[in-house]
Amino acid sequence: SWRNGKHGAQWLTTLESYAFPHFGDLPVDQIDSGHVRDTLAEIWLTKPETARRVRQRIGTVLDYAHGKGWRTHAFGMAAVNKSLPEQPPKIGRFEAMPYGRVPEFCDSIKRRVSMGRLALEALILTATRSGEVRGARWSELDLDAATWTIPAERTKTGKRTGKPHIVPLSPAAVDVFKRAKALRIEASDLVFHGSKRGKPLSDMTLLKVLRDLKEPFTVHGFRSAFRDWVAEQTNFPGEVAEAALAHTIPNKVEAAYKRTDFLDKRRKLMDAWGDYCTGRAGSVVRLAAAQ
């Protein structure tokens, strides 16, 4: 289930570096919580992100071993978690612009036209990921129906579920794509093409827009700003916001029953977000939430 060969190599490298030296020669049914706890403790505070990955990968291997019948009992990672100290808080990761500043920022990026600025504006208004926006194709867009259908293989969730993600486009988002269409290269299906022929924009191009405007925030952080705005300024249900972000439902039983993608409700939500970002919200945000 690895995304690609590089991902698989990273998996093995982390286990070889951190797990194998401690218990790599033990049969899987002999590995206990003490082995795993002592392994993680060495890097838990000094390399917190790496330690969390090692924990997740060890847990996956041992869960798989239990499922195959190679371990008599499921591994108790909860006991390991409780025996480890609290990690220091993450600093600067996916730091989000406060949603109250987003309308002002959207206004500022419109003052000059560039592919990077158009792509960043589209990202904000659709609450999508950088790779999804940078890889957007004209063939995925239906501006008359105001929808953008991102193929499953181009979304983080779709790679697991096999389902495309349909993004309802607000009038503000449609306007961005229409402005991008004026810069379209006929030989390319890419919406936001890079300087090299046939190549999309790089992720650094979007980040450079933020840095040029002296903003310390991350591109990915706009998804957090959107989620905070939904929670604090609207009455839209949380599951609608999560569907707009293309997040999977972590509870498998709940996910089995909730097969809707809330498209109609998401359209109202994205229209309200578009109005907010472009300064046209007025009192619409609160009223739009009566679902």
Image: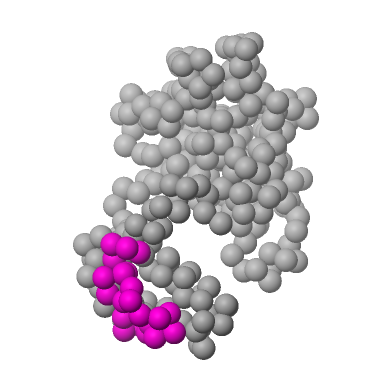
Residue pictured at 76% horizontal, 55% vertical: 260
Q: Classify residue 150 as left or right of residue 71.
A: right
Q: Taking 10 as reference, is 160 left or right?
A: right
Q: Which residues are magenta?
A: 15-35
Q: Can the viewer see residue 52?
A: no
Image quarter in which the N terminus is found = bottom right
Q: Is residue 254 left or right of residue 50?
A: right
- Residue 29 within the segment the image draws in magenta: yes
Residue 23 falls in image quadrant: bottom left
Q: Residue at x 61, y 49 (%)?
A: 159
48 above or below 195?
Answer: below
The image position of residue 166, as x and y in percent, is 70, 41
Between 106 and 69, the residue placed more toward the observer is 69
Residue drawn 69% across and 33% down?
148
Q: Is residue 255 visible?
A: yes
Residue 31 among those drawn in magenta: yes
Q: Nearer the viewer, residue 12 or 153?
A: 12
The residue depicted at 31 percent of the width and 48 percent of the height is 92
Front-most of residues 27 and 77: 27
Q: Front-most of 111 and 199?
A: 199
Q: Give percent across and percent down for residue 96.
A: 41, 44
Q: Is residue 186 above or below residue 5?
A: above
Q: Is residue 219 above or below residue 73?
A: above
Q: Position of residue 119 (x, y in %)?
A: 52, 26
